[in-house]
Image (cartoon, rainbow, N blue to C red):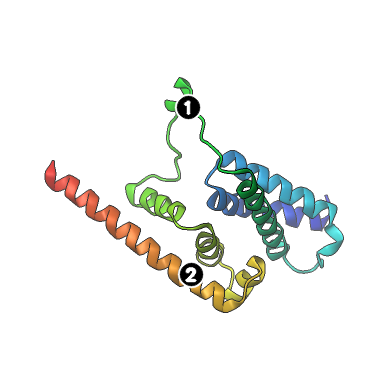
C-alpha cells in the first residue's frame, strides 16, 4: 500500500465517528464512510500528498452527507423498523459506560444536523474554526454562530435531563 492510501486508511476511525454523529445510524454511517473512501480513492490525484488527508476526507464526507440529506428530503422521511426479539436483547455499546456520557451523546444527537456537524468537527475532531468552516462550505461567522447555538441548545437539553433525573431520584 502506498503512503497516500495508508494515510487515508489511518483516518477511517475518525471518519466513522463523524459519520455516526451526523447520521445517528451505524449502518448508514458505515455506508457513508464507504462512499467517502470510494470517492477519495477514485480521486486520489485531487489530494496534495505531503499534507494530511483529514480535511480533504471530511470535506468529501460532508458533501456526501448533504447530498444524502437532499435525497431524503425529496423522497420523504425514513421510518425505523421494529427490532426483532434477539436485537432487542442486544447489549448497549460499551463506549457509553456511564449515564453522563450517554446523556451527552443523546443530547448531541437531538440538536440540528448543521449545529451537530459544526460542534463535532471543532470540539471532537479538533479542527480549527477556519478548517471546519472550509469543510462545511460556510463562512467562519456562520460556523461560529452554529457552534454557539449548538452549545446553547446542548446546555438546555442537558440541564433539562439532569433536572428530570434529579426529580426521579427525589420521587423514588
Q: Residue furthest bottom?
A: 141
Percent coordinates x, y for residue 95 in the rendering:
45, 45
Residue 60 sits in which quadrant?
bottom right
Say what secondary structure mark 1 lies in: loop
What label sits on residue 109 in the rendered view?
A: none
Split into 4 quadrants, where in the image is the C terminus?
Answer: top left
Count the labels in the image: 2
Q: Is residue 39 left or right of residue 160?
A: right
Which residue is tagged 1? 83
Left or right: residue 43 versus residue 29 is: right
Q: Depth check: give the residue in front, 112 or 171.
A: 112
Q: Is residue 49 left or right of residue 141?
A: right
**Residue carrying label 2:** 147
- Mark 1 Cα shell of 10 Å, populated few (<14), some (14-19), many (≥20): few
Mark 2 Cα-neighbour bin, 10 Å: few <14, some 14–19, many ≥20: many
Residue 17 lies, in percent from the top left, at 57, 51
Could you say where residue 24 lies in the image, as x and y percent from the top left?
Answer: 52, 46
Residue at image position (69%, 62%) is 59
Front residue (pair 111, 135): 111
For label 2, the SS is helix
Based on the displayed image, in which of its 4 quarters is residue 96 positioned? top left
Question: Are the two marked residues, 1 and 2, in contact with CB atoms closer than 8 angstroms?
Answer: no
Image position, residue 52 (x, y; %): 72, 65
Pick out the residue farthest to the left: 171
Q: Earlier in the sequence, mark 1 or mark 2?
A: 1
**Relative side of 112 to 50, left or right:** left
Who's the residue at 39% across and 61% down the image? 154
Q: CA distance from mark 1 to mark 2?
A: 35 Å
Q: Is residue 141 above or below residue 117?
A: below
Q: Residue at x 41, y 50 (%)?
A: 106
As rendered, which of 78 and 24 lies closer to the eye?
78
Amino acid at each position: 500500500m502506498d503512503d497516500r492510501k495508508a494515510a487515508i486508511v489511518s483516518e477511517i476511525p475518525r471518519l466513522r465517528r463523524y459519520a455516526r454523529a451526523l447520521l445517528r445510524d451505524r449502518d448508514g454511517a458505515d455506508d457513508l464512510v464507504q462512499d467517502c473512501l470510494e470517492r477519495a480513492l477514485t480521486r486520489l490525484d485531487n489530494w496534495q500528498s505531503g499534507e494530511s488527508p483529514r480535511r480533504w476526507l471530511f470535506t468529501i464526507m460532508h458533501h456526501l452527507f448533504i447530498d444524502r440529506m437532499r435525497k431524503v428530503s425529496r423522497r420523504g422521511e425514513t421510518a425505523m423498523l421494529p427490532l426483532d426479539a434477539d436485537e432487542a436483547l442486544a447489549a448497549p455499546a460499551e463506549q457509553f459506560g456511564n449515564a453522563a456520557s450517554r446523556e451527552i451523546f443523546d443530547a448531541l444527537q437531538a440538536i440540528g444536523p448543521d449545529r451537530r456537524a459544526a460542534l463535532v468537527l471543532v470540539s471532537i475532531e479538533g479542527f480549527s474554526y477556519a478548517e471546519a468552516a472550509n469543510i462545511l462550505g460556510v463562512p467562519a461567522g456562520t460556523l461560529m454562530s452554529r457552534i454557539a447555538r449548538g452549545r446553547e441548545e446542548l446546555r438546555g437539553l442537558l440541564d433539562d435531563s439532569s433536572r428530570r433525573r434529579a426529580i426521579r431520584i427525589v420521587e423514588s
